[in-house]
């Protein structure tokens, strides 16, 4: 890094005093030789330095994502690392940042490359038979190939199972707020969102549609849905709203039922059966409206519904709200951790929709290979062997497309276009 003055090449005017960094290829970000200028950020300085640079005929501004594309093309990054970098730049929460850092560090790349290696080894066994004839190779060569293909098959399945975990890291947990009309569900959503996201009135049945807001709750990305109050109704619009509410509740990772302390014993049959079915956390609201202490309200609620987490508060006066928020945060963290574990102890991988598509493709080809029944190979014709090899080749190609080692021209543009200029 050099301390230097930036001088206009023609007028020799001093434009700024700054720093220049020389990154020698191939160990630079793009793999090429790179010089980086660190100048002061005033608009006049930037304009004059850029216009000075543009007097060199070979220099131009970079396209969006061009640096990253060059890094990919020189083999410095593979596609999973490129995507990780994009996720890192756009990470909103600390969990997203951690997961993206993993991808940038090449964790996904290693997993996919070793998977592809397994398939290619299986393929090489099958090709040995094609090249040398059955007589020339050991008897158990096909058996070997099948063992490897089955191992790859298991690995693909476990990566696909990671997709839901990844979705949680990428987009967040789903929290559904539901309950009877007028209990304060939308008031709660607005409180969590710290803005008037939902309409609140004292008319029961105000919320009709599902309203989703993505929030950062205690460092976790959480998609909170406010739903229509559940009751029996003849109103067509409200009915549809209630159906949508039920869908949102079923989809949610965390379900929270808001009840009005004054109406604890008046819940509709529909709502009661919903509470029994989904076993939600309960928030007893409007504590200010009844002369009950929080512990009396809790006792009453537990008498009515046997729920695991119950809080009593007044969203209006603020009584009990801090405790509710702290404990809800802890429950969210628990659920998040449980979802991520998913019976596993390794760190979650960020599998995105593009990876999933190729993994599903690979799974089909591996299925086709394993379904060919070449075990007692003697019966199989040499055509069968050639077809079997093809299935493995396609499977390897599908995995290769994830890291971008082959056949990916058409998807490159989409990925790099999402980058901002200068990265
Ligand atoms: N007294 C009192 N009123 C509250 C409290 N929280 C909310 N409310 C009022 O209760 C009424 C209903 O609140 P909403 O948030 O619209 O209720 P909702 O559950 O979304 O109702 P629907 O959308 O109709 O299902 C509004 O007039 C709120 O101001 C509270 O803690 N105490
Ligand atoms: Mg509402």
Image (cartoon, helix red, strand yellow):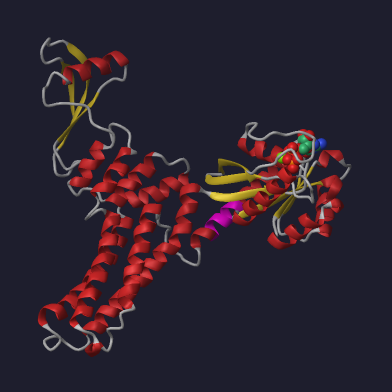
Across and down, in percent, residue 409 comes to 23, 48
State the predominant SS element of the stretch in magenta.
helix
Residue at the spot 35% in from the left edge and 73% down from the top edge: 367
Viewer-proximal residue among 289 and 251: 251
Viewer-proximal residue among 330 and 172: 172
Across and down, in percent, residue 322 comes to 69, 41
Residue 368 appears anywhere in the view: yes
Q: As drawn, is 31 to the left or to the right of 97? A: left
Across and down, in percent, residue 70 comes to 20, 41
Residue at the spot 17% in from the left edge and 44% down from the top edge: 27
How many numbered callouts? Answer: 0
Residue at the spot 12% in from the left edge and 9% down from the top edge: 11
Write down the region rendered in magenta.
331-338
Residue 68 lies, with reference to residue 141, above or below; the image says above
Q: As drawn, is 340 to the left or to the right of 136? A: right
Across and down, in percent, residue 212 comes to 59, 42
Q: Is residue 353 magenta?
A: no
Residue 39 lies, with reference to residue 282, above or below; the image says above
């Amino acid at each position: 890094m050099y301390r230097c003055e930036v001088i206009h090449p023609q007028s020799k005017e001093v434009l700024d005093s700054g720093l220049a960094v020389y990154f020698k290829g191939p160990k630079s970000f793009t793999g090429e030789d790179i010089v980086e200028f660190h100048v002061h950020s005033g608009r006049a300085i930037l304009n004059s330095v850029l216009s000075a640079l543009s007097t060199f005929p070979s220099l131009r501004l970079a396209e969006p994502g061009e640096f990253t594309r060059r890094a990919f093309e020189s083999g410095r990054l593979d596609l999973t690392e490129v995507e990780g970098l994009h996720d890192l730049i756009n990470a909103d929460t600390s969990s997203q940042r951690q997961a993206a850092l993993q991808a940038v560090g090449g964790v996904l790349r290693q997993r996919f490359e070793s998977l592809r290696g397994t398939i290619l080894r299986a393929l090489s066994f099958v090709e040995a038979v094609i090249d040398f004839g059955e007589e020339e190779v050991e008897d158990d060569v096909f058996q070997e190939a099948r063992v490897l293909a089955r191992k790859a098959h298991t690995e693909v399945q476990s990566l696909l199972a990671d997709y839901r975990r990844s979705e949680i890291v990428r987009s967040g947990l789903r929290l559904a707020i539901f309950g009877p009309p007028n209990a304060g569900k939308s008031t709660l959503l607005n409180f969590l969102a710290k803005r008037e996201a939902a309409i609140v009135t004292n008319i029961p049945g105000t919320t009709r549609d599902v309203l989703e807001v993505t929030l950062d709750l205690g460092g976790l990305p959480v998609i909170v849905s406010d739903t229509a109050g559940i009751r029996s109704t003849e109103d067509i619009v409200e009915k549809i709203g209630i159906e949508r509410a039920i869908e949102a509740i079923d989809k949610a990772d965390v379900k929270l039922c808001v009840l009005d302390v004054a109406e604890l014993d008046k819940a509709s049959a529909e709502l009661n059966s919903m509470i029994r079915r989904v076993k939600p956390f309960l928030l007893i609201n409007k504590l200010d409206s009844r002369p009950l202490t929080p512990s009396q309200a809790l006792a009453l609620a537990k008498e009515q519904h046997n729920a695991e987490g119950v809080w009593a508060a007044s969203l209006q006066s603020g009584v009990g709200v801090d405790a509710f928020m702290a404990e809800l945060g802890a429950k969210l963290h628990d659920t998040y951790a449980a979802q991520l574990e998913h019976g596993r102890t390794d760190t979650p991988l960020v599998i995105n929709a593009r990876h999933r598509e190729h993994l599903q493709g690979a799974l089909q080809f591996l299925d086709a290979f394993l379904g060919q029944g070449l075990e007692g190979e003697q019966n199989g014709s040499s055509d069968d062997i050639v077809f079997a090899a093809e299935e493995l080749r396609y499977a390897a190609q599908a995995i290769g497309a994830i890291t971008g080692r082959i056949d990916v021209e058409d998807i490159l543009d989409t990925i790099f276009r999402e980058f901002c200029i200068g990265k």
